Each structure stands twice: as C-alpha cells, then as structure tokens.
C-alpha cells in the first residue's frame, strides 16, 4: 500500500509517527501491550507476583511481591529481556529494574 501524502509532502504515516514520538502515547501503548501479554512473556509464576510494570526510555521496571523471586529474576535479567523483546516482536527493552 502506498503512503498517502499531505499537501506539504509529508506522509500521513510520518506525521503520525512523529506525533506518537513527541507525545507520551507511544510509551503508554507499549506499556499496555506488555501488561496484556505479561503472563505469556514472563511465565505464570513471575506474572502472579508482579504488582506493577513501568516502561520508560527502554527501561522496564518490574515490581514483585516476593523477595526470593526478585533474586531469581534479577539473576536472569538478560534472558528475560530477550524473551520480552522476542515476544513483543521488536527490541523495546534494554534494561530491567527489579523493585
């Protein structure tokens, strides 16, 4: 499908992408998508003990209610980053912070 262009020569997709980057909506959409797929991305155990997720500037902060699980997840951050990025079909997360 061809891009449609506005009178000034900018594509509608380009204008939309620019708007999404400047606004906070893109981050919130990504965060919502992660929350929706959370159990699929991290597994049932981690999902059940997750109390909050925050995504900002390629950093994912995960709030867990179990100290032993925090240690386990902390030791497997790189694997978790890989699973999340693969599950989301794009590289979104560079760093995970466990709280």
Image (spheres, grey):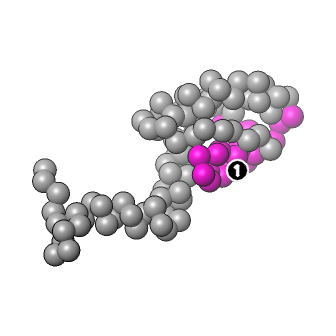
Asked if 76 appears above or below 64 in the picture, the reply is above
- The residue depicted at 48 percent of the width and 33 percent of the height is 87
Spot occupied by residue 81 in the image (x, y as percentages of width and height): 60, 32
Provide the secondary structure element on which disc 1 rests.
strand
Residue name at image x 49 percent, y 68 percent: 23
* Residue at position x 77%, y 30% in the image: 74
Residue 69 visible, this orientation? no
Residue extending farthest front: 8
Is residue 52 visible in the rendered image? The answer is: yes
As for residue 62 lying within the magenta part, the answer is yes
Q: Is residue 44 magenta?
A: no
Where does label 1 land, which residue?
52
Quarter of image, res 79: top right
How many C-alpha atoms fall within 10 Å of the one at disc 1: few (<14), some, or many (≥20)? Answer: few
Along the line of sight, the residue nearer the viewer: 22 or 96 = 22
**Place of residue 21 in the rendered image (x, y in percent of width and height, measured from the top left):** 46, 61
Q: Is residue 68 above or below residue 38?
A: above
Which residues are the magenta region? 47-67
Q: Which of the two residues, 85 or 21, is positioned nearer the viewer here?
A: 21
Considering every residue shown, the one lying at the far right of the view is 67
The front one of 8 and 21 is 8
């Amino acid at each position: 499908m061809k891009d449609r262009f506005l009178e000034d020569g900018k594509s509608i997709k380009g204008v939309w992408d620019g708007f999404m980057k400047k606004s906070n909506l893109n981050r919130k959409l990504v965060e919502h998508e992660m929350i929706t797929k959370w159990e699929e991305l991290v597994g049932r155990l981690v999902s059940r003990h997750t109390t909050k997720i925050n995504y900002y500037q390629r950093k994912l902060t995960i709030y867990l209610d179990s100290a032993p699980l925090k240690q386990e997840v902390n030791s497997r951050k790189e694997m978790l980053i890989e699973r999340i990025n693969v599950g989301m079909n794009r590289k979104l997360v560079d760093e995970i912070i466990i709280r």
